[in-house]
Image: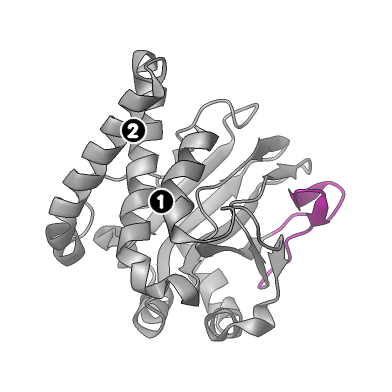
Amino acid sequence: MEQLKEEWFAYFSSEHYSDSPNFYSSECFDWAKAIEANSDEIATEITRIINSEDFTPKGYFIKGLTEKSGWKTFSFITWGIRINKALTLTPVFNNSLAQFPEIVSISINILEAGEKIKAHHGDSNTFYRCHLGIDIPEGLPKCGFRVNNQDAEWKNNQLLIFNDANKHEAWNLSDKKRVIVVFDVIRSEYKYKKKAICLKIRSFLILQLLFEQYSFIKKMPKWIHKIINSTIFILLFLLYPYQKKHGVIKKHN
């Protein structure tokens, strides 16, 4: 799967898809400063959502990345497509979306006590992945995050911005759950390819979902995987105008 990712994303950049720094400073980006400036309001909003009846987080769909299935997400926008019912719960992030169209995905991310997320690669270096600390039970060494060999810790109301394409892992060895907001921001040099990037990543997510649900597909030759992925991409492209106007048809992580 990693090789397939590299091949498909090669045309987005002259660099190798994971040749970027591990972490970035929030001081470098206007959108990051705006998010941190409103972090108290966001934390209040997210806490209210978590405690509401409408909060129904789902376990992360790729099996084997955690030991106890204690990694859960609740999405508001998925790669450029809004989840309208969820977004009505978060006016602060709705305002951020209007100000910063480069933000293409937002979700609540929960890591239960005693859980680890195994080392894995993300999809592309064409975006910044951002973690905003909402409820961080402890710092390092019990609760932390690693990109390649560089460790970091989450802090409440602060952003952790990193390169999702580099190998990364997370752990929460405390006795309380860790809550963050995850959002993705298209890098400025790729802003004119935002739609293609979002469609490509969504097509990969659906392909991986098919792998998890139908093991025989995963066992097929790679050339068939490429055909399936291309077909998904075309279908998403055709559905894009409708979904952009009306929101997501079927949620996926």
Quadrant assignment, res 79:
bottom left
Residue 74 appears left or right of 68? left
Q: Residue at x 73, y 61 (%)?
A: 154
Q: Residue at x 52, y 27 (%)?
A: 63
Residue wearing tag 2? 226
- Locate residue 242, reporting x and y percent: 12, 59
Q: Amino acid at mark 2?
A: Lys
Q: Residue at x 53, y 61 (%)?
A: 14
- Locate residue 212, reporting x and y percent: 41, 24
Residue wearing tag 1? 55
Q: Amino acid at mark 1?
A: Phe
Q: Is residue 7 visible?
A: yes
The relative height of residue 181 versus residue 144 in the rendered view (above or below) is below
Residue 46 appears left or right of 227? right
Dot 2 falls on a residue whose secondary structure is helix
Q: Magenta stretch containing residue 139, yes or no?
A: yes
